[in-house]
Image: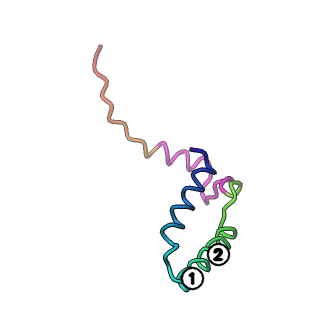
Amino acid sequence: MSSSTQHTSYADYYFGVLKNLNADSKLDLISQLSQSLKSDKNDTTSLESLFGAYKSEETADEIIAELRSSRISNRNIGPL
């Protein structure tokens, strides 16, 4: 099913459910949908904001040393 066909079927389904609402309920729904569209535009996070340098008070060598010291090996190697 293509995206436009799926969108149409969703719209038809919801219209069928909502068409029996009274006028006040429909206006309230329109208002809420409009507000959600306005807030979605302001709340989007750009993909570029997810990238960047890791910030820490520790130096890279301290972080590496901490990672290596926290490793636990319980592997038992048997004789051959």
The x and y percentages for residue 25 are: 53, 82
Report the Cα–Cα distance between label 1 and label 2.
10 Å
> Could you tell me which residue is drawn at 55 percent across and 61 percent down?
12
The C terminus: image quadrant? top left
Q: How is the image coloured?
A: rainbow
Q: Earlier in the sequence, mark 1 or mark 2?
A: 1
> Could you tell me which residue is drawn at 42 percent across and 42 percent down?
71
> Could you tell me which residue is drawn at 30 percent across and 28 percent down?
76
Residue beneath disc 2: 34
Left or right, residue 56 beside residue 16? right
Residue 42, disc: none
Viewer-side residue, 75 vs 33: 33
The x and y percentages for residue 15 are: 54, 67
Going by the numbered disc 1, the residue's amino acid type is Asp
Task: Based on the picture, tell me whether residue 65 belongs to the magenta stretch.
Answer: yes
Asked whether disc 1 touches disc 2, contact meaning CB atoms under 8 Å apart, the reply is no
The x and y percentages for residue 27 are: 59, 82
Left or right, residue 51 beside residue 22? right
Q: Quadrant of residue 26?
A: bottom right
Q: Which residues are magenta?
A: 50-68
Residue beneath disc 1: 28
Mark 2 crowdedness (10 Å alpha carbons): few <14, some 14-19, many ≥20: few
